[in-house]
Image: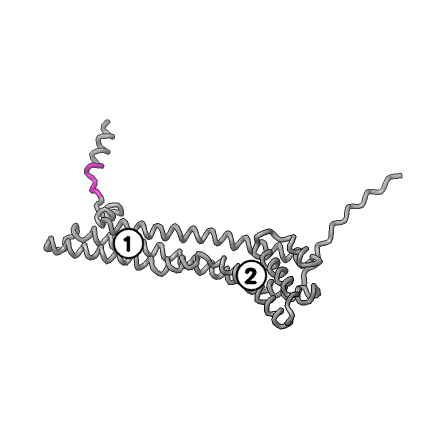
């Protein structure tokens, strides 16, 4: 009992923190809560886009690795397309190329027919790139605006500190610490939201650039294969030879 009483007395005698995060939000009122909610929403959206786009990009890159191993060994584009996953970016380019080839034969002008075939593949490639780039403008917006949203909370906090000084007639620490602490917290929150968003944007943009280069090269190979009636194909490594069965041991005499 003595120890319990001693701990209780120590807890009551300990000074209470009046300048914590919750206290700063309470003093800031509606503006502080609104700023935190906006920054929290931005942060959640940034991480959601980062993870969803990362897995989408990884899926496309893994599909390209499988494409290099088997697609160009097929006898025709249709046979190669059958080996690709449905609704994949690479399957879309092949299907659009085959559809454009059918329309290509109906055109009387050879130059216009070639332009139509090239434009169809370019349009298909652009649609894939646009799908990959969706969501990145949000990351750029968060990275550019969240520091200013935090700065707005900072300005409001400093303004409240100046009002408290004017009312009290002196710059005592108990009048200034709360609003100034609130102001610094809002600045820190704005930076914590902005920095991951900018890093995620640059990282995803670099991976999108790599995928765009792969799409452009694949689209060019498909165009060359269609124009040459299947004669032109990129060089591929030979298929691995099947392992020979082990020889049966010789029968003993």
Q: Which residue is mark 2?
A: 124
Front position in the image: 186 or 137 = 137
Say which element carries label 2: helix
Magenta segment boundaries in residue numbering: 11-16
Say which element carries label 1: helix
Quick check: 136 left or right of 61?
A: left
Pointer 2 local density, CA inside 10 Å: few below 14, some 14–19, many at least 20: many
Residue 145 badge: none
Quick check: 136 left or right of 58?
A: left
Relative image position of residue 96 (x, y in whole percent): 60, 59
Which residue lies at the image location 14% right of the left edge and 55% below the top edge?
165
Pointer 1 local density, CA inside 10 Å: few below 14, some 14–19, many at least 20: many
Quick check: 249 left or right of 170?
A: right
Relative image position of residue 201 (x, y in whole percent): 43, 59
Whether residue 2 is situated above or below residue 70 in the rendered picture? above
Outermost residue toward the top? 1
Relative image position of residue 176 (x, y in whole percent): 18, 53
Which residue lies at the image location 71% right of the left edge and 58% below the top edge?
75
Residue 208 falls within the magenta-colored stretch = no
Of discs 1 and 2, which sits in the foreground? 2
Quadrant in the picture for the N terminus: top left
Front position in the image: 220 or 226 = 226
- Kindly report the distance in space between the C-alpha atoms of the residues bearing marks 1 and 2: 45 Å
Relative image position of residue 29 (x, y in whole percent): 22, 48
Which residue lies at the image location 24% right of the left edge and 30% below the top edge?
4
Residue 186 badge: 1
């Amino acid at each position: 009992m003595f120890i319990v009483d001693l701990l209780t007395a120590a807890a009551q005698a300990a000074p209470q923190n009046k300048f914590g995060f919750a206290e700063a939000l309470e003093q800031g009122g509606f503006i502080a809560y609104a700023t935190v909610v906006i920054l929290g929403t931005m942060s959640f959206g940034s991480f959601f886009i980062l993870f969803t786009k990362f897995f989408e990009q990884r899926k496309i890159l893994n599909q390209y690795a499988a494409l290099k191993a088997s697609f160009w060994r097929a006898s025709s584009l249709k046979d190669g397309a059958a080996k690709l996953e449905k609704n994949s970016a690479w399957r879309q380019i092949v299907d659009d190329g085959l559809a454009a080839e059918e329309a290509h034969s109906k055109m009387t002008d050879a130059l216009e027919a070639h332009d139509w075939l090239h434009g169809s593949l370019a349009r298909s490639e652009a649609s894939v790139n646009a799908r990959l780039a969706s969501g990145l403008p949000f990351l750029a917006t968060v990275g550019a605006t969240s520091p200013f949203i935090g700065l707005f909370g900072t300005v409001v906090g400093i303004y409240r500190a100046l009002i408290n000084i004017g009312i009290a007639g002196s710059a005592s620490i108990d009048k200034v610490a709360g609003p100034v602490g609130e102001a610094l917290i809002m600045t820190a929150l704005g930076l914590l939201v902005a920095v991951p968003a900018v890093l995620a944007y640059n990282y995803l943009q670099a991976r999108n650039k790599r995928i765009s280069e792969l799409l452009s090269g694949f689209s060019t190979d498909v165009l060359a294969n269609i124009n040459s009636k299947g004669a032109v194909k990129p060089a591929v490594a030979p298929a691995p030879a099947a392992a020979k069965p082990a020889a049966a041991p010789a029968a003993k005499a």
